[in-house]
Image: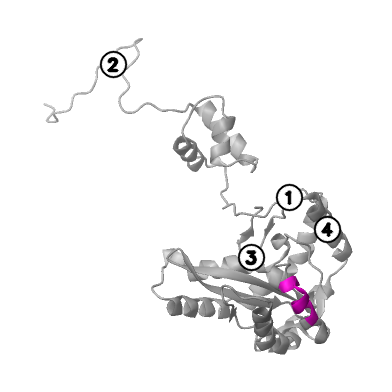
Amino acid sequence: MNSTNSVSPPTHQGLETTSYGRPKILIPRDGRQIGKLAATGQYSIREIRRELPFTVSKDTVHRSLTNNTDLEWRKRLTQPPLTQRHKDARLEFARKYMSWEKEWQKVIFTDEKKFNLMDRMVTRIIGTISRRNQKSFLSDKQNGKTELASIPPRADSLGYQVVLKANLIREGPKIGGRGWIFQQDNALIHASRSTLNFLARRNMRTLPWPARSPDLNPMENLWAELSRRVYSHGRQYRTKQELERQIHEGWANIPLETLQNFNDSMKRRIFELILQGNLNYCTISISFGIPLIDR
C-alpha cells in the first residue's frame, strides 16, 4: 500500500495531461530571440523588452538572459558620448602613435579613482604606472608605480599641482627613466592654463591625449584589478581609514607582470581603434581576465 497522501493525476493515452504549477511565460523561440538581441551588445534589458513582438516584464527578460548559457556576461559601465570631433581626434591620435613600441616604456600613465564607503564617496585616489624594460623595472623600488596619493574631493588646479609636486615630479624619472613622458586626461584641473604652465616650467614632456578616451588608458584595467582586491568577497569597510589602508595594501601587492600586461596592451588598444573605424570604445582583455568593457 502506498503510504503517501499525495495523489498523482491520472494519465490517459491520447489525452493531454494536466499541467501543474505556474505556466512558463516564454517558449524556447522567445528565449532565443531575447538572446540574439542581447548578443549584439547594443541593448539594455529595457531596450530588449521594447524590441520584442510580445509583451513581457523586465524581470522575465532578465531571467531568460541569466539562464542563457550561450552568453558571456560583462558589466557595461557608463562612457561619455562621442561626437564626431571626439572620434576624429581619437583616430588621429591612434594613427600618430601606431608605430610606437619601445616609446611606450617611457610613458607614465596617470588616472584618478573614487572609492566608496557604504555608497558614499569618501576618498579620491590618483595613481601612476610605467612600463620599463624588465631589468631596470625590477631594480626599481617602486616597481613601476608611484605610491597612491589622495586628492581632496573638490581639488582645484593648485591642489592637483601640489599632489604632482609631492609625488610625480620626484618619482617620474625613477620609474619612467630619462626622457619620461607624462600622460593625463583632459579633466579641467589637468588641462587648465595654470596646470599646463606648471608642467612647462618644469620641462615635463606630456603626451597629448584625446578627450573622452578612458578606454585608451591602461590604468582603467588597473583600477578594475585594484577594486577586485579591495572589495573581494563582498567586503565592506566601517571607516575611511580602514578602506584607505586596504586600498594601499592592494595597490602594493599588484605584481610586476600585471603592470607589464597593462602597458603592453597600448599597441593593441590603438590598432583596435583604427580597425573598428573609431565607431565605439575599445574592448581590450588583459591576460589575467580583467576586461576593459566598451561602455
The mark found on residue 280 in the picture is 1
Q: Is residue 192 magenta?
A: yes
How many residues crowd around disc 4 within 10 Å: few (fewer than 14), some, or many (20 or more)? some
- 3 sits to left or right of 120: left
Q: Earlier in the sequence, mark 3 or mark 1?
A: 3
- What is the three-letter code of the residue carrying label 2? Thr
**Residue drawn at point x = 54 percent, y = 38 percent:** 46
* In this view, the mark in front (3 or 4): 4
CA separation in Å, label 2 and label 3: 59 Å
Q: Amino acid at mark 4?
A: Ala
Sequence order check, earlier mark of 1 and 2: 2
Disc on res. 221: 3
> In the picture, which quadrant includes the N terminus?
top left
Whether the residues at callouts 1 and 4 have beta carbons within 8 Å, the answer is: no
Residue 161 image-quadrant placement? bottom right
Circle 4 is placed at which residue position?
89
Mark closest to the chain's N terminus, 2 or 3: 2
Cα separation, mark 1 vs mark 4, equals: 13 Å
**In the displayed structure image, the side of residue 89 where residue 48 appears, left or right:** left
Please say whether residue 143 is visible from this viewpoint.
no
- Mark 4 vs mark 2, CA separation in Å: 70 Å
Q: Which residue is mark 2?
A: 11
* Residue numbers of the magenta segment: 190-197
Q: Nearer the viewer, residue 289 or 109?
A: 109
Real-space CA distance between mark 3 and mark 1, rounded to the nearest whole angstrom:
18 Å
- Of badges 1 and 4, nearer the viewer stands 4
Q: State whether residue 269 is above or below residue 196.
A: above
Residue 293 locus on image (x, y percent): 64, 55
